[in-house]
Image (tube, rainbow, N blue to C red):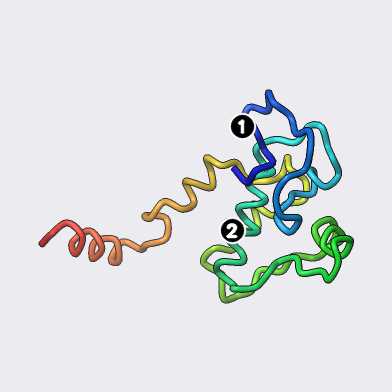
């Protein structure tokens, strides 16, 4: 939880903003009363982008600039992070209803999804055989 989504099933709703502006989802910025756990999916994707690129995704000079970036800036995933492009593309959708679910994100990060068969065999061999 990134401090602004208080309940996965949305029983308890947001009553004030908390957290860093750079990681807020578009629906939180718009004060949409129907926000959901997908706000955390957005925030996760922003943090993940920054971890793998070592760059801030939304880097406006003022708070207003950051908000405009979050709401309107074209998001380009660099080719250097091609391995994670699907994760980022599906998590950085401005419409929450189009954003990936947390369950699907977890499936995308399953180790077998990123390793081909030969690397998987080598990994298991080196990990489980002493």
Q: Which residue lies furthest to the top in this view?
A: 11
Frontmost residue, 20 versus 76: 20
The structure residue drawn at horizontal position 54% and vertical position 63%, both measured from the top left corner, is 84
The structure residue drawn at horizontal position 69% and vertical position 41%, both measured from the top left corner, is 4
| Image location (x, y in percent) of residue 43 | 66, 52
Dot 2 crowding, Cα within 10 Å, few <14, some 14–19, many 20+:
few
Dot 1 crowding, Cα within 10 Å, few <14, some 14–19, many 20+:
few
Q: Nearer the viewer, mark 2 or mark 1?
A: 1
Dot 2 or dot 1: first in sequence order is 1
Taking the image as shown, residue 24 lies to the left or right of residue 61, namely left
Which residue carries the number 1 mark?
8
- The correct choice, above or below, for 21 with respect to 11 in the image is below
The disc label shown at residue 86, or none: 2
Secondary structure found at label 1: loop
- Quarter of the figure with the N terminus: top right
The structure residue drawn at horizontal position 89% and vertical position 61%, both measured from the top left corner, is 64
Q: Which residue lies furthest to the bottom in this view?
A: 80
| Image location (x, y in percent) of residue 111 | 38, 55
The structure residue drawn at horizontal position 74% and vertical position 51%, both measured from the top left corner, is 24
Frontmost residue, 106 versus 82: 106
Frontmost residue, 119 versus 91: 91
Q: Distance between the residues labelled 2 and 1?
A: 23 Å
Q: Do the residues labelled 2 and 1 touch (CB within 8 Å)?
A: no
Query: Can you tell which quarter of the image residue 121 is in?
Result: bottom left
Secondary structure found at label 2: helix
Q: Residue furthest left?
A: 130
């Amino acid at each position: 939880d990134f401090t602004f989504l208080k309940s996965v099933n949305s029983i308890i709703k947001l009553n004030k903003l908390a957290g860093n502006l750079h990681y807020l989802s578009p629906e939180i910025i718009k004060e949409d009363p129907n926000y959901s756990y997908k706000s955390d999916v957005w925030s996760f994707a922003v943090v993940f982008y920054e971890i793998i690129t070592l760059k801030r995704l939304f880097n406006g000079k003022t708070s207003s600039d950051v908000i405009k970036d979050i709401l309107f800036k074209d998001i380009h995933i660099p080719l250097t992070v091609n391995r994670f492009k699907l994760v980022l593309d599906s998590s950085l959708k401005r419409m929450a209803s189009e954003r990936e679910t947390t369950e699907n994100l977890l499936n995308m990060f399953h180790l077998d999804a990123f390793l081909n068969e030969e690397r998987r065999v080598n990994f298991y061999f080196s990990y489980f055989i002493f």
